[in-house]
Amino acid sequence: MERREFLKHAGILAGASALASETLLAAGERKEGAPMKFQISLAAWSVHKAFYNEGMKMIEQPKFCKEVGIHGLELVNSFFPSPQYGYLKEFMKAAEDNEVKILLIMCDNEGDMAHPDKAFRMLSAKNHHKWVDIAQVLGCHSIRCNSGSGKHGDSEAVKRAAESFSELCDYAAQAGLNVIIENHGGLSSYPDELVSLMELVNKPNFGTLPDFGNFPDEVDRYEAVRRFMPYAKAVSAKCHEFDSEGNETRTDYSKMMKIVLDAGYNGWVGIEYEGDKLSEREGVLACKKLLERFQ
């Protein structure tokens, strides 16, 4: 079912648009009377162990956010038990009850946007349409996609991906949504290729989601994030381990957050905890405490 039919049957075209607008305004909220430089959100992947191994349901994630003092949530498409409107409405109620904004959906395993076969890559683009529809219902501002396969220096793969993403951005624009790419393997792992992709597509609703990790060893990630920030519509604060003073041991957060803020960014910064020395709850709280130094 195409987006407009989906929303028509759900009976919420106007309401979804209003929710999306509300989400985009969130970065201007105040904390204790003073403007914040950014707000802290939670990437649902931070609790993937609880989800896969401990029986946490996706609908419980807004409650988890409230318990750790976070009011923005970034969903993962593979966590959805159902894309049906009844479930989405129930999930929206859970988010509202816990004062949590649903910000975006991380979309994986929907094909290869840079595939050499045009029919396959255009099908990959269309596979994301349903997530645009769902994101609009939930009041998100974006869906996060993967760039597609390709290696450093593969300019032809960049051109192929640009064709796919142009189509997807046009579809998402009808819903008032952004399409964003995280450095998450393939072409996106390399700054030259991802920046070239941004320039080739050149649409206002196409952007990046810079992640503090996820780069090959040969890439200077601080410089890479600096190059991605002019296109950023979200930021992922990857964290694994912390020292006795609460600093992340793999990333210099003072240096990285200066890059983020110097770019004029004042949106959401999403915690993505992937460590194994702390529990997921403890890791999220440690990363939150670290990020609060820079707010």
Image: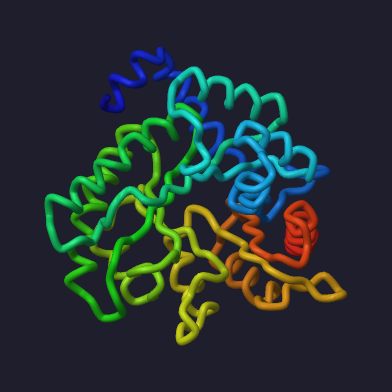
**Where residue 217 appears, x then y in whole percent?**
49, 84
Q: Where, by quadrant of the figure, is residue 187 drawn?
A: bottom left
Taking depth in this image into account, of 217 and 81 the one nearest to the observer is 81
In the displayed structure image, the side of residue 87 where residue 200 appears, left or right: left
Q: Which residue is drawn at 26% across and 81% down?
A: 153
**Where residue 147 appears, x then y in whole percent?**
33, 61
- Most extreme residue toward the front is 53
Question: Number of marks in the image?
Answer: 0
On screen, residue 129 above or below 18? below
Q: Which residue is drawn at 40% across and 15% down?
A: 10
On screen, residue 124 above or below 183? above
- Most extreme residue toward the bottom is 218
Q: Where, by quadrant of the figure, is residue 9 drawn?
A: top left
On screen, residue 235 above or below 94? below
- Most extreme residue toward the right is 244
Taking depth in this image into account, of 190 and 27 the one nearest to the observer is 190
**Where residue 216 appears, x then y in whole percent?**
46, 79
On screen, residue 222 above or below 203? below
Taking depth in this image into account, of 45 and 163 the one nearest to the observer is 45
**Where residue 239 appears, x then y in whole percent?**
66, 66
Q: Which residue is drawn at 44% across and 35% down?
A: 135
